[in-house]
Amino acid sequence: MHRVWRILWIGASIVFALFVAWIVFARAHWGAQADVGAAFLAKQVCSCHFVGGRDAEWCRRDMGTDFDPLRWEVRGNTVHAGIPLLASRSATWHEGMGCTLE
Amino acid sequence: MRLVFMPRTASSRAAYAGAVLVTVLVSVAGAAVPLPPQPAGVPYPTEAWPVAPPGPGVDVERLDAALDAAFELRGWNGLPDTRALLVVHHGALVAERYAQGFGPDSRFQSWSMAKTVTQALVGILVGQKRLDLRAAAPVPAWRAKDDPRGAITLDQLLHMTSGLDNADGSPEPDSFASRLLFGPGSLDVFAYASNVPAINAPDTSWAYSTGTTMIVAGIVGRTVGGGSAGMLAFMHRELFDPIGMRTVVPEFDAAGTFLGGAWVWATARDWARLGYLYLRDGVWDGRHVLPEGWVGYSRTPAPAPNNGVYGAHLWLNLEPKAKQFAPLPGGPHSAFCLSGNGGQMVVVVPTRDLVVVRLGVTQTMTFPAVTQAVAAVVATVAPSSPEE
């Protein structure tokens, strides 16, 4: 029984290590691109919605399908966008001054 | 303009001299066309645009057909790519059309039309003698001894002939523009855009650069003072309020710099007001909002070959060479325009006393198709000046 647990523990560690390695690899190769994409989505949806006065879902659809892999949401005056573990950006609206990327 | 550097080789000097000669000839040909005065009895559109049916000199049937054609192609939201199209003729709004769901109260993003807003602010500060076009541009990062960037002037930044290594590049995520606007530069566009080397002597090359405009916007902000709040107050007091642009929202980065290369929002009628200011030579209801000579200066071509005919943060419609694009193909050489990504256009045609505004996207239309659609609208209006 002890041996079984030991095998499971080693297996889980290997899987976890591979997962971390994949994250590091993905961030190195696609992180910058994902960051730019997340920022673009956050900024454009924020400005279109809060400054342009249009529905946020409409604003997102108007950007086309290239941004489909990204998740996004509006929380208060901020639009958050990104891909989990890879990129996360946000843009916040300020009265009279539009949306600012953070 | 003051020449600080000269090209080093005989062949590049000859090419440079040729470019200067062509520039002078072209500027004499096109920029000399005077701007028309305000028609007698027509109020400036500070409070509201005078509205009138198209008058003599407008082919109404062709205009309707041109508007129909401009709104034909549909994109991702089931809407036409053209979301707004306005025509101002002899000081009155004679045509105004919007895609479904848009109207006179809808704000539209400028993209690079904001560059002309930025240059208007420079003009105001030049008129107030707070900036000097021919002096070294006041950029702190360039002040080190022997830094060649220390000789770059505001004039060279406005004509995009600074020689800085900050050309926009492609729309890809790894281009300079993408990194500036959405990547590592997005938190402080002024610092990011100005922290690049000079790779050419000023006035020897041209490169379209949103980063350059962010540098100019940063210079304006630092000259005005008061951070983003001070800049916003200045913009409204000196430019937007005097000409009745009440819906305009300029945007800022986290460091407080006006994002003057890409982000100003306003209604189509307000964008028409900005174009109208340039049509009237910077004069609004008897007051010089832009200093005397500023619009003429803005229409002087950049002294280096480029992909269109570029003035000082303004696109010109002078005779294009091979591989150059014209913002108004087949249209009058007197025309000039504000232009932004997605086919944002405010076209000013002095010889027809005309402003045409087209706003929207290019999801199915190409940019050349947009310019042709706008040119088709302009073509329905007869010249009203013997200069054309």
Image: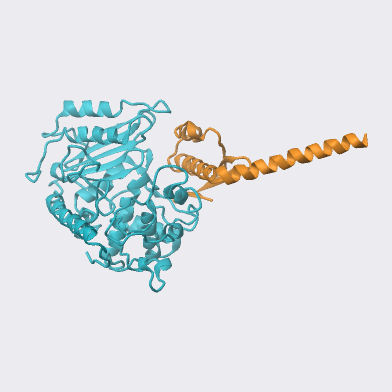
- Residue B96 position by quadrant: top left
Out of B142 and B96, give the one closest to the viewer. Answer: B142
* Chain B tint as drawn: cyan
Q: Residue B137 vs residue B6: left or right?
A: right
Q: Which residue is depicted at the point 35% across and 49% down?
A: B114
Relative to B86, residue B316 above or below? below
B20 lies above or below B272: below
- Which residue, as the protein is rendered here, is positioned at the far right? A1
Residue B144 point in image, percent of width and height: 41, 72
Residue A4 image offset from top left, x and y in percent: 88, 34
Which picture quadrant has residue B231? bottom left
Q: Which chain is orange?
A: A
Residue B286 in view (yes/no)? no
Vertical side of B123 occupied by B174: above or below: above
| Residue B334 visible in this rendered orientation of the protein | yes
Left or right? Give the position of B246 relative to B371: right
Residue B93 in which image quadrant = top left
| Closer to us: A83 or B130 | A83
Instruction: Name which residue lies at 74% across and 40% down.
Output: A16
Quadrant containing the N terminus of chain A in the rendered view:
top right
Q: Position of residue B271 (x, y in %)?
A: 30, 44
